[in-house]
């Protein structure tokens, strides 16, 4: 049975042929059709066009969406959805004046999450994580990357990746798994970084490869965490197992990490709250996607990624949530799009491109997700009746999504 949406007020992100990414001035162009139809067969987009050319309704499941906006589901290319418990006390500590670095130095932060995760069963972690996944799907996310990194032990990291694998098996949403064993140094390795990196490379990575548990590899390349040279070793080790790099970098300091990532052909560099002119020059003409995480900046009161400077220099930019228990306990991509417009001065067109097509590139799924193109996956969201898609970032606390379709099926 074919599904036919008719009388679509605005059909966004319509592309005759799919594109890998959009950069610079092209990010301000969001192709759309007004008074449109969209036809879906099984899990694929079959056809679209203006209503005057709409196919007959025979043998089709016809849905009238008069007054509503239809666009591709969000692609969230950077999350830490799998974790145990929460870090609500650290939220209060920050309100009382402690910085992220001060909390971490007192045993909080990533090490706090690792302690909780290693004390929690795999089944319980799965049960907690699936609730978060279901929530983000209901908010319009149709593809999501999920990182490990709260185990920091052989068993802890494998446990997280097995949970991600189980989520992949049980939910229709596209999921990519990233191994982030290099998230922080466990207490026992604080003075012996080489030993922990050896554990990652020679003990954990082979087991991950044996069980096919990861698609990508990541490291927290930052002052006080993993140095440029340490991150290079991890990227090279990942490459040997076919795991391209997606690296946390330039969140608090700029230490030439972006250069190392580009040289090692990282798929994405994520955070970028601080970006130098040299960083921009290095990213130009590379195949590495910069990824901004504005809800993290909002939650812990750090600078926002300088989107205007980067886009005006001709770069692409993707948007993601950074959903995690410490610095961004939210996976709401609608808020991310709004924050990008309000705080980073991106236009709604740029923000939607960043949260769909460019997000798909940063996840490695450009050929199947991110646009309304014939043959692409039927992953769409339908808004409530709106005057314009500009209302999505404008009414930033309102739930404007009426329904979500993943792989051609409406999610209940």
Image (cartoon, rainbow, N blue to C red):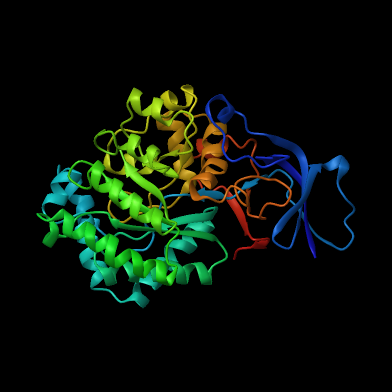
Residue sitting farthest toward the front: 240
Look at 20% across and 47% down and name the residue there: 225
Q: Is residue 108 visible?
A: yes
Q: Quadrant of the C terminus?
A: bottom right
The percent coordinates of residue 279 (x first, y second) are 35, 29
The percent coordinates of residue 202 (x first, y second) are 28, 64
Residue 127's quadrant in the figure?
Answer: bottom left
The percent coordinates of residue 242 (x first, y second) are 44, 57
Question: Does residue 94 appear left or right of residue 31 in this picture?
Answer: left
Q: Quadrant of the N terminus?
A: bottom right
Look at 30% across and 46% down and name the residue there: 232
Closer to the camera in the image, 412 or 66: 412
Q: Is residue 396 visible?
A: no
Q: Is residue 294 above or below residue 147?
A: above
Q: Is residue 364 above or below residue 189?
A: above
Closer to the camera in the image, 170 or 329: 170
Q: Is residue 209 above or below residue 402?
A: below
Residue 389's quadrant in the figure?
Answer: top right
* Total number of numbered discs in the rendering: 0
Closer to the camera in the image, 171 or 223: 223
Question: Does residue 325 appear left or right of residue 131 in this picture?
Answer: left
The percent coordinates of residue 357 (x first, y second) are 57, 42
Closer to the camera in the image, 9 or 308: 308
């Amino acid at each position: 049975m074919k599904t036919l949406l008719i009388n679509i007020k605005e059909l966004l992100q319509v592309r005759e042929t799919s594109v890998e990414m959009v950069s610079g001035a092209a990010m301000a162009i969001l192709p759309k059709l007004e008074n449109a139809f969209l036809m879906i067969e099984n899990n694929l987009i079959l056809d679209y066009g203006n209503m005057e050319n709409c196919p007959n309704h025979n043998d089709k499941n016809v849905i009238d969406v008069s007054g509503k906006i239809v666009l591709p589901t969000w692609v969230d290319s950077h999350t830490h959805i799998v974790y145990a418990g929460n870090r609500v006390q650290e939220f209060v500590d920050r309100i009382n004046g402690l910085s992220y670095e001060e909390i971490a130095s007192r045993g909080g932060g990533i090490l706090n999450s690792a302690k909780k995760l290693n004390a929690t069963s795999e089944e319980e972690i799965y049960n907690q994580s699936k609730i978060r996944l279901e929530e983000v799907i209901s908010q319009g996310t149709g593809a999501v990357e999920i990182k490990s990194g709260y185990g920091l032990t052989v068993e802890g990291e494998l446990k997280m990746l097995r949970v991600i694998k189980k989520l992949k098996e049980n939910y229709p949403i596209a999921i990519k798994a990233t191994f982030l064993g290099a998230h922080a140094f466990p207490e026992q390795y604080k003075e012996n970084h080489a030993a922990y990196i050896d554990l990652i490379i020679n003990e954990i990575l082979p087991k991950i490869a044996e069980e096919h548990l990861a698609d990508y590899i990541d490291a927290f390349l930052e002052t006080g965490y993993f140095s440029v040279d340490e991150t290079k070793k991890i990227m090279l080790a990942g490459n040997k197992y076919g795991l391209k790099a997606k690296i946390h970098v330039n969140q608090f300091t700029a230490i030439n990490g972006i250069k190392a990532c580009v040289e090692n052909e990282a798929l994405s560099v994520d955070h970028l709250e601080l970006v130098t002119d040299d960083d921009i020059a290095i990213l130009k003409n590379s195949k590495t996607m910069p990824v901004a995480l504005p809800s993290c900046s909002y939650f812990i009161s750090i600078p926002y990624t300088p989107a205007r400077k980067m886009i005006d220099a001709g770069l692409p930019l993707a948007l993601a949530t950074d959903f995690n228990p410490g610095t961004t306990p939210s996976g709401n991509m609608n808020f991310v799009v709004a924050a990008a417009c309000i705080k980073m001065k991106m236009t709604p067109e740029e923000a939607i491109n960043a949260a769909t097509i460019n997000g798909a590139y940063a996840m490695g799924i450009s050929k199947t997700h991110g646009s309304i193109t014939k043959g692409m996956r039927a992953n769409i969201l339908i808004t409530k009746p709106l005057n314009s898609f500009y209302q999505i970032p404008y009414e930033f606390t309102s739930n404007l999504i009426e329904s979500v379709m993943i792989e051609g099926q409406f999610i209940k």
